[in-house]
Image (cartoon, helix red, strand yellow):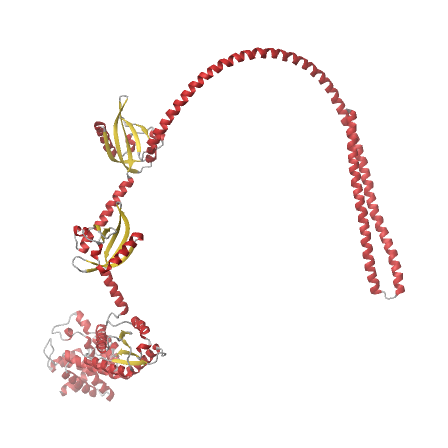
Amino acid sequence: MSKNINIDTDKLISKCTQKIFSVIKFSAKRTALKITLIYFMIGCLWVLLSDMLVETFVKDPSTTVIINIAKGWFYVFVTAILIYLLVFSALKKLVNAKEALQQLNRVLEEKVAHRTQQLESTNAILIKSNALLEQEVIERQKVQKQIAILNESLEVKVLERTIQLQLINKQLEEEILEKVKAEKDLSKERYFNDAVLNSVPGLLYLYNMDGKLIRWNKKHEEMTGYSSNELSEMHLADFFIDDEFQTVVQKVEKTIQDGVGEAELILRRKDGTYIPIFCTAVRLELDGSLYFVGMGVDISERKKTEDRLQKYKILAENTNDAMLFIDKQGKILEVNQAASKLYGYTYEEFLKMEIYDLRRTYEKHLINEKMALADQEGCIFEAVHKMKNGALMHVEISAQGTYLGQTRVLLSIIRDITDRKSAEQNITYLSYHDKLTGLYNRRFYEDEIKRLDIEENLPISIMIGDINGLKLINDIFGHIEGDSLIVMAAENINKVCRSNDVIARWGGDEIIMLLPKTSACEVEVLCKKIDTTLQKDHTLRASLSIGYATKKNINEDINQVLKVAEDFMYKRKLLQTRSLRSSIVSSIISTLQERSIETQEHSDRMKELSKATGNAMRVSETMLDDLELLAILHDIGKIAIKDSIINKNAKLTEEEWAEMKRHPEIGYHITQSTAEFQHLSEYVLSHHENWDGGGYPRELKGEEIPLLSRIISVVDAFDAMTNDRPYRKAMSKKSAIQELKANAGTQFDPKVVRVFINDVVRCL
């Protein structure tokens, strides 16, 4: 064994040595190659660079030769030093590797010697162990012989026992097979019974006479929410509230008595919710004990359906819309009460009719098309139906295919939309007509001008008229009178124009006329007719300022023609406005004298007294002229006051007096509207102001009130007191003078009163 160990150690050392030498050998090759490469590279670089430097800096050939010799020796010297250093380094590494190898050999020899000694000791112990094992083997062989003898005896006994067990097993197998077959048959029967019970669409139950739940199916667990273990401990009372349970007890007693029973009950579930169920039960007697067994079906959906049917019935019978069931041939199968109310037919009459009887006969093909569409996808449409009395009715029909039992029918819901159609027509009319005049509106005109602007309608003329004095009429009489003037103008224009002319209200006081196939000469004649007609038809002699233009060539822009007509109208309006307003004011004065006590005699007296007072107060000639006009115009605002107030024979009420007090402001607006009287407007506005500030409308006082207004106030009061009025007789001059004096300094200017009494009244 020692010899084997020495052999192994030698092999190990040999392998290590070979490996080290292979490494050294590889390292030597690499080092030699490295030295060679360095030498080659340095040589190449030296030759290349040195030659370049010599060529650059040395131009003398002899010097170049000397330098080349010197650089050769220099290169040899330097490379010798480098080779020495590289070889020295490589050899030093080789010596170090050899010393390391020798050191490794010494360590390995020591370890091998130590290991050899251990192995020799172990070998001696193994020799002793082998001797002991040989002795134990001999003894074991003796024991094995004895065991073999015992085994032979045991095998005989086991064989006998095995035969006995085989006989017993055969008998047991037969018994087990019979039992398994019986259990399978029983399990199959039980599975079949459970499947039948669990397939029932309701809960099954078996209760004893104490109300204890004995048997149930899976549906019972699902419907009540209780588990099987929970149900096994429950009683009948656990599923019903107190009042409902009393009903259940009565039904159970009746079932026991009659043998069968049924009832609709409210079952309480585990989560506290309730469901309606329909229960059937029969009496069962088993082993001398009474039970009742039955089934409960959830009728929630049936109840919902019944509720929905009831609601549908209420809806159908109480809705205002007619409902008809119609078959595919158009025969009416069923109607609600609203249909009878809507059409006037009785229920029996409807059942003898077809849908075609409600429509005009020539529309039958349209009815069939709508019926087909309704059956396929449903539709909503409008139609005209005939009522029993022959009247026509606009209706909206919503039709949908459905089933009435097994029959495919159409359900038509019919609504009377006659009022809606009338409203729609009215809306359509209003969308293109002016509400006040009934003329077309600007929107319609703008659409029509596009439609009529074609070559076939040439020449096309446009007339545009502006109602003169409309603002003045509105200010004096109010917008109702102004609207009346607009309507009158529209009606008179309609009388003169042709049926195919387009007449529209263009703006507040402007009316435009679009006249196809009308020349300029024809338009001029039409303008004169309109002016003549208007002058005959109104007290205030309202008129139109009319401008017009004619399109003769298709290339002309119709909007430019309109602009020419507008410009012409504005020029004519400027020329007519002044004379028209003066005319209106003159008409107002005439009208005022006609409808009130303000007679021409009153105006004459006012002019005479006012002029005399002005002269007495030494006012200028201009102011005398204004005073004379003011005497006529001061009450012009009363034109807008109701006759019932102006001519009332009794004292005015507060409301009437408030209305009467408006006339100075109305007169102010009237005089402001005309250049001739505009400078009098402030006097008209102030002629009811009092010296002490208690007058109206601005409560001016003292000399804030214009002088002419103060004079008119005194003169008007004196004339009113000394002449008869509807509500009193005239005063004497003496009494009137006393009244003026009494109110001097409060209502009247004291100076004006003094001058009027002393210089005017006393001279009468």
Residue 460 sits in which quadrant? bottom left
Residue 669 sits in which quadrant? bottom left
Residue 746 visible from this viewpoint: no
User: Residue, x 24% and y 55% (percent of image)?
Assistant: 414
Q: Position of residue 692 (x, y in %)?
A: 22, 76
Q: Quadrant of the C terminus?
A: bottom left
Q: Position of residue 105 (x, y in %)?
A: 80, 33
Closer to us: 635 or 592: 592
The answer to whether 482 is drawn above or below residue 105 in the figure is below
Q: Is residue 4 left or right of residue 618?
A: right
Q: Is residue 128 left or right of residue 500?
A: right
Residue 621 visible from this viewpoint: yes
Q: Is residue 677 left or right of residue 739?
A: right
User: Residue, x 47% and y 17% (percent of image)?
Assistant: 169
Closer to us: 167 or 397: 167
The answer to whether 582 is drawn above or below residue 257 in the figure is below
Q: Position of residue 465 (x, y in %)?
A: 27, 78
Residue 500 sits in which quadrant? bottom left
Closer to us: 660 or 460: 460
Q: Quadrant of the N terminus?
A: top right
Number of marks drawn: 0
Q: Position of residue 158 (x, y in %)?
A: 53, 13
Residue extending farthest to the bottom is: 621
Q: Is residue 49 left or right of residue 347?
A: right
The answer to whether 365 is drawn above or below residue 188 in the figure is below
The answer to whether 223 is drawn above or below residue 380 in the figure is above
